[in-house]
Amino acid sequence: MRLLLQWTIIIPILAWLLFFSGLIYDSSLFQIVASVLLIFSVMSAVHHSEIIAERVGEPYGTIILAISITVIEVSIIVSLMMSEGQEATSLARDTVYAATMLILNGIIGLCLLIGGLKHYEQNFSASSVTIALVSLVSIVVFTLVFPTFTESVQGSYYSTPQLIFASIACLIIYSSFLFAQTRRYRQYFLTIGPDENEEAAEPIEINNRDFFTSLIFLIVSLGIVVLLAKTLSPTIESIIVSYSLPKSLVGVVIAAIILLPEAIAAIIAARKNRLQTSINLSLGSALASIGLTIPSVAVVCILLDVPIILGLDIKSIVLLGLSVFIVMLSLSSGKSNIVYGVVLLVNLFAFIFLMIYP
């Protein structure tokens, strides 16, 4: 733990030094270095959030991890929208949609496949999945589907009253989910393995020095992630455009960078036969990604009078609906199966393929 804590302190400091040096603007080599530091700074932020989470125990640990990742996502989206203006009107939709598809199909698919290959069959709480998916389906429809079919404003937009209503609805639904996860039905979300009991879910002792160090460097890591992502986004976009790929892939790249450490944590948990933790991470992050990102972006857009495209096209709605439907069926029994994982991963490949070859 000490060794891991050391590199998670050194990396963000190096990233801050590179950013303030100004070298990142003048050299492709330093942009590559910055990209590597960006990825490791994200992992550093998540590691520090896990240290803090150990202090408070489950399921608060997965909530802290999910919200930390969402803070990164919101900060990047808002900073890019403020800097690019009208050119970034669909960035929030593209990033949230990509994050949802990557979580539902990619992370959950890999967890079911890898966990199933190693342990044959894994158990988890179907009740926790139902609570999460009921909340997720409602939020997805309010934010990514309804704007395509409303009539107050032409196009895939919400009018200001509609945007305010959708944002409030997201916050109410996500808050009720957190209440269920942390208070009313907390037992559904606890990881109980074959050789564990209720006491295994108690928080691990973290001393005050480690706790406050992680608290400080969580903020430090989040700050440099936002700055580096904003700085490197024009380069990422220019690379994508130079290969005649759709600009919507920028949202996929941003979402993939943000979700990388969470994906690693979820897969490791599945390999350790703790699939409940993997599902808590995945579905909790999907809910936070939409339920917190859209209201935050909505506030910025209303204050700055910037339009925001939220509604998906029919093809994307069908793909999203298919993904949610398959996840609901796959997790309805409380037992895992490698077939479910394979099908979800095929859905992910279809999402990427149809984005490149529409």
Image (spheres, helix red, strand yellow):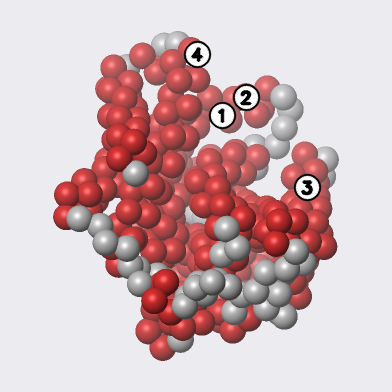
The reply to whether callout 3 and callout 1 are in contact (CB within 8 Å) is: no
Q: In which quarter of the image is the N terminus?
A: top left
Q: What element carries label 1?
A: helix
The numbered mark, 3 or 1, whose residue comes first in the sequence reads 1
Mark 3 to mark 4: distance in Å? Answer: 30 Å
Judged by depth in the image, the label closer to the viewer, 3 or 2, is 3
Reading the image, the residue beneath label 1 is 236
The numbered mark, 3 or 4, whose residue comes first in the sequence reads 4
* Residue depicted at x 67% and y 78%: 334
The reply to whether callout 4 and callout 1 are in contact (CB within 8 Å) is: no
Q: Is residue 334 visible?
A: yes
Q: Residues within 10 Å of mark 2 (few under 14, many from 20)?
A: some
Reading the image, the residue beneath label 4 is 28
On the rendered structure, is 205 left or right of 259?
A: left
**Where is residue 316 shown, x and y percent of the image?**
74, 57
Amino acid on which the number 4 mark rests in the picture: Ser
Mark 3 to mark 1: distance in Å? Answer: 21 Å
Amino acid on which the number 1 mark rests in the picture: Ile
Amino acid on which the number 2 mark rests in the picture: Ile
**Where is residue 273 shown, x and y percent of the image?**
60, 63
The numbered mark, 2 or 4, whose residue comes first in the sequence reads 4
Mark 2 to mark 4: distance in Å? Answer: 12 Å
Reading the image, the residue beneath label 2 is 239
Judged by depth in the image, the label closer to the viewer, 2 or 4, is 4
Q: Is residue 5 above or below residue 71?
A: above
Q: Quadrant of residue 180?
A: bottom left
Reading the image, the residue beneath label 3 is 349
Judged by depth in the image, the label closer to the viewer, 3 or 4, is 3
Mark 1 to mark 2: distance in Å? Answer: 5 Å
The reply to whether callout 1 and callout 2 are in contact (CB within 8 Å) is: yes
